[in-house]
Amino acid sequence: MTLTIGSLRAEPGQKTRGSLSADLGTTTVEVPLVLVNGSRPGPRVVITSGVHGGEFIGVDAATRLSGLLEPDDIAGQVVICPAANPPAVYGGRLNSSPLDGVNINRVFPGDNDGGPTERLAAWLFEHLIDGADAYVDLHSGGIDQHLLDFAAYRLTSDTELDAKNRAMAHAVGYERVIVRPLPDGGNSHAAANRLGVPAILVETGQLGDRDPATVRRLLDALYRLLHHLGVVEASERVKPATVQPREWLRTGDVSSEVTGLWYPDAITGDEVTEGQTIGRIIDPVDGTEHKVTATATGKIIYGMNGLTVRPGTELATIAAPHD
């Protein structure tokens, strides 16, 4: 079957590289795509990275994967979008777009009549994600974020979809698998679930890391996942996981309530209890101290490393084992 996305086409046994224009209302951006149409039938797998700027590991790994995958080696179709949010990726921003200050991973599946970022989210869903057999969104800790590697999936009211989500997340082969009980909100994988598309989030690396060893860790995870999905056969590239995945529940999030300078007392990887002081925000003008406490008991799997924060800045995410 011919793989067609916009004006890009890949016949069976063909790999096509190019970009498509996305009309964002006030501007137009070029979204890069690599279409790998296997020589044998199989699932359509969509992989995105660069949803956020400053998260380099996923962008590097997706780009390398697009060079490694050849049509004769795969069954089905693989669509790779290495820079899904070009304004944020190339504009030097972190989670928000320089076009409108919006975090695209809070507004999926987007709105064709909304602002630039909402329109881009809608474009990605219309052209890439809707109709996929599996979707993987690659993220990492940005320049100011400490992060423990994990895969994540959502629970839905569809037991078959839940089983596919869970199996995909475990196939990644990371030690931590984060489960959230509802497919709500504007995250890409949750919005994909609401369309019935099996989808997971994969977080790899921290602090704007671009180390080749970290990229290799994610590439190994992607090959394990593609093997699980039946896209690639067992080979030397499909390396077995070295750890047993364990499921964790996301139990709490901590956000800044004020503007100021962030001084954490507990960092990523630390165990905390609900109500425990995990840091302070200092007003640089008058020295006023605002105490920040843990909203749940568990381990900090994400922590803000940056100094300057404002209301709504994510300071920490807490998770606990779920056996």
Image (cartoon, rainbow, N blue to C red):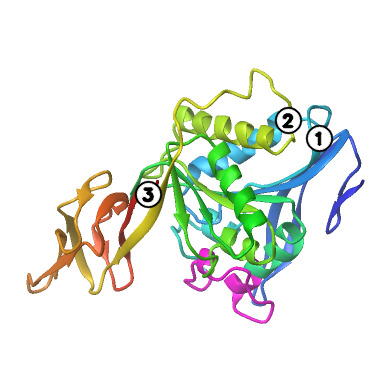
- Which residue is the site of mark 1? 75
Q: Earlier in the sequence, mark 2 or mark 1?
A: 1
Q: Against 12, is 236 above or below?
A: above
Q: Residues within 10 Å of mark 3 (few under 14, many from 20)?
A: some
**Left or right: 131 in relation to 209:** right
User: What's the CA distance linking mark 3 and mark 1?
Assistant: 36 Å
Residue 134 numbered tag? none
- The location of residue 309, given as percent across then percent down, is 27, 65
Q: Earlier in the sequence, mark 3 or mark 1?
A: 1
- Which residue is the site of mark 2? 232
**Left or right: 84 in relation to 96:** right
What residue occupies the far top of the structure in this picture? 236
Total residue callouts: 3
Q: Residues within 10 Å of mark 1 (few under 14, many from 20)?
A: many
Disc 2 residue type (three-letter):
Val
Quadrant housing residue 175: top left
- The location of residue 232, given as percent across then percent down, is 73, 30
Instruction: Give the camera-side residue of 313 and 74.
Output: 74
- The location of residue 96, given as percent across then percent down, is 47, 65
User: What's the CA distance linking mark 2 and mark 1?
Assistant: 7 Å
Magenta-tinted stretch: 99-120
Can residue 136 be seen here?
A: no
- Which residue is the site of mark 3? 143
The residue sitting at 43% across, 57% down in the picture is: 94
Residue mark closest to the camera, 3 vs 1? 1
Can residue 107 be seen here?
A: yes
Disc 1 residue type (three-letter):
Ala
Quadrant housing residue 311: bottom left
- The kind of secondary structure element at disc 3 is loop
Q: Contact (CB < 8 A) between labels 2 and 1?
A: yes
